[in-house]
Image: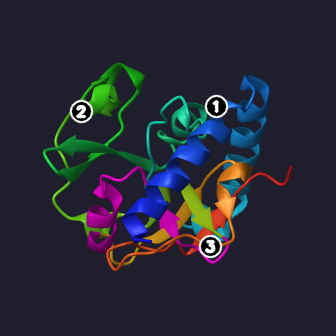
Amino acid sequence: MRIGILKKQLRTQLKREKNQLSYAQKQRESKQVFEAIEGLPEFQKVQHVLCYWSLPDELETTDFINKWFRKKHIYLPRVSGDKVEIVRYEGPETMLPGAFGILEPQGSSISDPALIDLVIVPGMAFSVSGARMGRGGAYYDRLLPELKSAYRIGVCYQCQLINEIPVEIHDVSMDKVIVCDI
């Protein structure tokens, strides 16, 4: 069976599993994952962090972003065509709906992606070895190679961590995957 078909089936299954999570469970897992990130030496020693503004089915990032954006430089992605621009987050008032209805930061994008020290990456699934499967648009697969020296942390709900993911040549692996310890 082709990898693309396997990925599509896995995305459908995981979407169903995420939809079964309660609001309280989503909040608990989000809190635990981001507290774990805050405790990492890789996070503590850096100043330039690329995160993501969470969708309803992703680990919640709003509290984390608003806690840290005055202490560190927090950046968020902004979709422009088939590329992702990196824009510094300057507060909730700077967020407006962008591509796909996702809130995105306004302002100028950074010109040098090598500025990013650490990137927190969402995904549909992660393997225990760090492989990542996204939503299928390959936005992060195009962006991550530009962040050559950034430490890559994948984050997901417990149900999204699986033993093995079908991997294609363009898929970028994570340095670490953090999930809730249920």
30 relative to 71 in the view: left or right: right
Q: Position of residue 74 (x, y in %)?
A: 42, 47
Residue at disc 2, secondary structure = helix
Element on which disc 1 rests: helix
- Does the rendering let one see residue 119? no
Instruction: Classify 79 as above or below 177.
Output: above
- Reading the chain from its start, which is encountered first: label 3 or label 1? 1
Residue lying furthest right: 182
Per the image, is 142 magenta? yes
Q: Residue at x 67, y 54 (%)?
A: 38
Which residue does the image show at 63% across and 78% down from the upper left?
A: 129
Residue in front for this viewpoint, 38 or 25: 25
Mark 1 neighbour density, 10 Å: few (under 14) some (14–19) many (20 or more): few
Q: Amino acid at mark 1?
A: Asn
First of labels 3, 2 by sequence position: 2
Highlighted range, magenta: 128-146
Disc 2/disc 1 C-alpha distance (Å): 23 Å
Circle 1 is placed at which residue position?
Answer: 19
**Residue most toward the front?**
1
**On residue 99, which mark appears?**
2
Residue 164 numbered tag: 3
Instruction: Residue at 41%, 61% (x, y): give it.
Output: 5
Residue 177's quadrant in the figure? bottom right
| Left or right: 160, with 136 as reference point | right
Q: Are circles 2 and 1 on residues that touch, CB within 8 Å? A: no
Up-down relation of residue 82 to residue 141 (above or below): above
The residue under the point 34% across, 30% down is 102
Q: Indicate the amino acid at tag 2.
A: Ala
- The residues tagged by marks 3 and 2 sit, at their Cα atoms, a distance apart of 31 Å
